Image (cartoon, coloured by chain):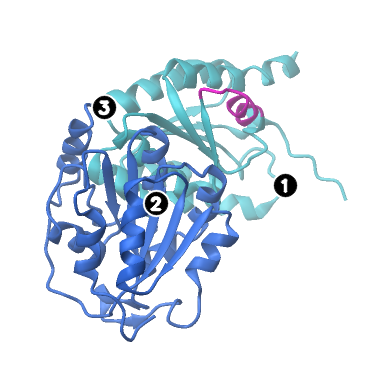
Amino acid sequence: MNAPVKTEWPDQLYDTLKRARIAQVGYVPDAGHARLIERCRADPDIRDVVLTTEEEGVALAAGAWLGGERASLLMQSSGTGNCINMLSLMRTCRFPMLMFITMRGEWEEFNPWQVPMGSIVDPVLKLCEAEVYRAREPADVAELAERAARQAFADERIVAVLLSQELIGKKVWTQ
Amino acid sequence: MSQGGLDRRAAMATLVADRGEDLLVVPGLGSTTWDLAAAGDDPRNFYVWGAMGGAAMIGLGLALAQRKRRVAVVTGDGEMLMGLGSLATIGIQRPANLAVIVFDNGVYGETGGQPSHTRKGTDLVGVARACGIPLCLDVRDEAALSGLAGRLKSLDETLFARVAISAEEPPRVLPEKDGVALKRRFRAALGF
């Protein structure tokens, strides 16, 4: 009965974004986040902002907060590396930064090029003074996401939820 | 652009003169932040001391959040070049209340005047136009600058302007640098 559960956690993330009154969602297209991106795009109360690189989404979230709105950033683990210097904006000014990161380069990864960045996401974010949560099972997602959203906006800090590769499933490679 | 060009301090002063309560200004790190401070402090200025490449996107997030106010990003050519992709992102969103203005002197003034890509031929107006930004202006003289300042007063479509400025570096005018304080006073000025 794995299949139905796997389609639920992105919907739970969407519910969290709605409860947290997220008005802007930045993202670089990502297979793991495909359903959540689709739901955000379909929502007239969420401005979906497709980015050329993930660091744009960090600066977007700072601007949104200056203007009284809440933003979130969806990305894949490799995108974390693209954000590092821009996260200093969030640390210096204590802007809320709520990130949902789908992991690659860990469970059953076929592509070794995903491993170097995927393997250091957690320590790198911690060095950036982010609170980092890890969801390994579908049942973990909703509660961790809620906690992350509360913490990001109430405490004005960087909070990341890492979504393990087991949640997303194996990427199918055919030649 | 290098030789000639407008005086950067005077250009900034022209752009923010009689700004009204609804103009929010985001400069880029370095010279444009000093220029904005020199033009007069205002809680609706969000001075940027770092985050190179991020000014235009801070402006986008702000413009999307504050549809009834005008947002002017005024940054330098080096800062814009680091976030060139954000022009593609802005070209898709196209908020009518956002202006991205680049003071282009063709050099990295803060680091000793090394030439930037624009000195060697990169055409920022061409990039912005190709990214789908509706109104793209190349400002090379006082008359065009006045025209830009006028358009800024009644923004009705996303605007990009390159302003050719002289490579002279006037003395630094340093504003507040505490990021938390800058954020709080900006939000307070908007009622948050």
Kindly identify the residue that appears in the image at 35 percent across and 83 percent down. Answer: B2
Q: Chain of mark 3?
A: A
User: In front here: B187 or A162?
Assistant: B187
User: Which-is-in-front pick, marks 1 and 3?
Assistant: 3
Quadrant of image for the N terminus of chain A: top right
Q: Are marks 1 and 3 in contact (CB under 8 Å)?
A: no
Residue bearing mark 1? A110
Residue bearing mark 3? A155
Q: Are marks 2 and 3 in contact (CB under 8 Å)?
A: no
Rendered view: B113 above or below B131: below
Question: Do dots 1 and 3 share one subunit?
Answer: yes
- In the visual, does B8 lie left or right of A168? left
- In the visual, does B91 lie left or right of B176? right
User: Residue B145: horizontal and vertical position, in percent?
Assistant: 32, 65
User: In front here: A124 or B100?
Assistant: B100
- Magenta segment: does it hold A107? no
Majority secondary structure in the magenta region: helix
Work out how far the residue at label 2 is from the one at label 3, CA to CA, in angstroms.
31 Å
Q: Which residues make up the magenta segment?
A: A35-45
**Residue A140 visible to an observer of this rendering:** no
Work out how far the residue at label 1 is from the one at label 2, CA to CA, in angstroms.
45 Å
- Magenta segment: does it hold A41? yes
User: Residue A71: horizontal and vertical position, in percent?
Assistant: 42, 32
Type of the residue with mark 3: Asp
Kindly identify the residue that appears in the image at 31 percent across and 74 percent down. Answer: B165
User: Which-is-in-front pick, marks 1 and 2?
Assistant: 2
- In the visual, does B1 lie left or right of B192? right
The outermost residue toward the right is A175
Type of the residue with mark 1: Phe
Q: Which chain is cyan?
A: A
